[in-house]
Amino acid sequence: MDIKDLVCTIVKELVDQPEEVSVTEVAGDNTSVLELSVAKNEVGKVIGKKGRTAKAIRNILAASSAKLNKKYMLEIKE
């Protein structure tokens, strides 16, 4: 399982419409940006109160990508 699939799996468990979840990767040399899209009415579920859920997902990303010597950033599209 790669990082993109990991984020997709986590987010699909959080939302009511998992078929609307999509993750695209914009790759760079040392940094890749993962663009997360969900249904418009479920963006709040992914962000969470005071951004806690989004921060937790980003922490998982950081821990997972440390082994790969590459940095991943998560961008939540609204």
Image (cartoon, grey):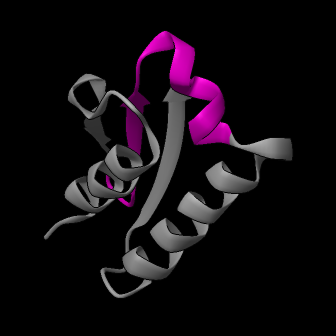
56 left or right of 3 in image: right
45 left or right of 31 in image: right
Specify start and end residues of the magenta stretch as a single range: 29-47
Q: Is residue 42 magenta?
A: yes
Closer to the camera in the image, 27 or 41: 41
Residue name at image x 29 percent, y 48 percent: 8
Q: In this view, does 55 lie above or below 76?
A: below
Q: Where is residue 70 in the image (x, y as percent from the top left)?
A: 38, 70
- Work out which residue is located at the far left of the displayed protein and give it: 1
Residue name at image x 52 percent, y 35 percent: 75
Q: Is residue 55 magenta?
A: no
Closer to the camera in the image, 28 or 76: 76
Residue name at image x 57 percent, y 39 percent: 46
Closer to the camera in the image, 17 or 21: 17
- Work out which residue is located at the far right of the displayed protein and give it: 50
Q: Is residue 41 above or below residue 14?
A: above
Q: Where is residue 65 in the image (x, y as percent from the top left)?
A: 39, 75
**Which corner quadrant holds the C terminus?**
top right
